Amino acid sequence: MKVISVRRNARLALVAFLVCAGFPVLFAQTSTQRSPVAPSREQVQAVVDQAYEKFKSDTGGKNADYIPALAQVDSKLFGVVAISTDGQIVSDGDIDHAFSIQSISKVFSLALAMNELGPDAVFAKIGSEPTGRPFNSVDAVVDMPSHTGNAFVNAGAIATVSLISAPSADAKWQMILDFYSKAAGENLTLLEDVYKSEAATNTGNRALAALLLKYERIYADPLESVDVYTKQCSVGVTAKQLAVMGATLANDGINPITHERVIKSENVPEILSTMMMAGLYDGSGGWAWHVGLPAKSGVGGGIIAVFPGKGAIAVFAPPLDEAGNSVKAQKTINYVAEQLGINLFSPRSVGLK
Ligand code: GLU
């Protein structure tokens, strides 16, 4: 990812201005829980609009083509949505185009497995170590035979699906789809063309599942697990629905639009920590360094980033870098995070004056 220059002075000036101005309506804040650095809705909208204009003509990266259907998606599509934990929405661009969720699904299947089994059992079986390897790495499985690395590499995600208990593969798929739909606050559906395209070409994932079987690290039928995993990756989401899913994580597991609890509160920190360490594959360290927000990308071109307690941003733009992360989405979120001063590791982002 090309690093966007840090505009510290501008950011500090903006934060100082917001603090001094004492905006009455704070983005992502209720009247009883204000952060001195939370920006106003108008400020967030302005920064989202600036980012959209700045990056909409960026031609970096290219669509994933190892899943043939993804190569067909219009590479110019670009949508940005930010949603606060009190349900305020700001957006720009193609926010209603449904695209495949791909790896971002892994966050929510992890949450479902943790809802059922608790964090300790999931941690023991799946792990939360960055692999430093590509998302579909076979070497990572061979090098870490005692666990699967983390729930966001393909091997770990397939093993996570295998952990979810259900009477049949169809029932498990339906449970997963219902769970994602609750997080999005709308009924999501399978993109059949993406599913068929991926199911016809996912020999690598089937090989990973066979390796997991060799190391006794898969907990249901391997091929069935790959098939459910392939379906979960082919769920269609819009940038807006994805932002609600991210804001559900930001809001301690409660959907900020429907107010329904989706993810157990006690599991949210573990999920976000895995996003921080492994959310952008072998680009995760660079992302933490530059942006400092837990995030998850998918090869469909989506990325969600979560500002815990405040809100989330989702960006959709199909062209990817070599690690499989959307180029425009990374630049957009990096820009928005810098301008709003919301890097989680900055003392200013948590209220230092
Ligand atoms: N379904 C994709 C795969 O298994 C997901 C990869 C991704 O989004 O990173 O390869």
Image: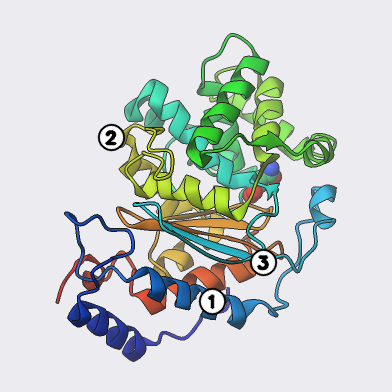
x then y, percent, for residue 52: 59, 75
Whether label 1 lies within 8 Å of ligand 1 gets the answer no
**Residue corresponding to mark 1:** 49
Numbered disc 2: secondary structure: helix
Which is nearer the eye, 17 or 278? Answer: 17
Question: Is 20 drawn above or below residue 295 in the view shown?
Answer: below
- Does residue 137 appear in this view? no
The crowding category of the residue bearing disc 1, from other C-alpha atoms within 10 Å (few below 14, some 14 to 19, many at least 20), is some
Q: Quadrant of ligand 1?
A: top right
State the mark number for residue 78: 3
Q: How is the image coloured?
A: rainbow
- Determine whether the residue tagged by mark 3 lies in a helix, strand or loop: loop
Judged left or right of residue 1, residue 31 is left
Rendered image quadrant of residue 138: top right
How far across and how far down the image is residue 193, in percent? 83, 40
Determine crowd level at label 2: few under 14, some 14-19, many 20+ residues with C-alpha closer than 10 A: some
Between the residue at mark 1 and the residue at mark 3, the CA separation in whole angstroms equals 12 Å
What residue is at 70 percent from the left and 75 percent from the top? 60
Three-letter amino acid code of the residue under disc 2: Glu
- In space, the residues marked 2 and 1 are separated at their CA atoms by 35 Å
Image quadrant containing the C terminus? bottom left
Front one among 322 and 257? 257
What label sits on residue 266 in the rendered view? 2
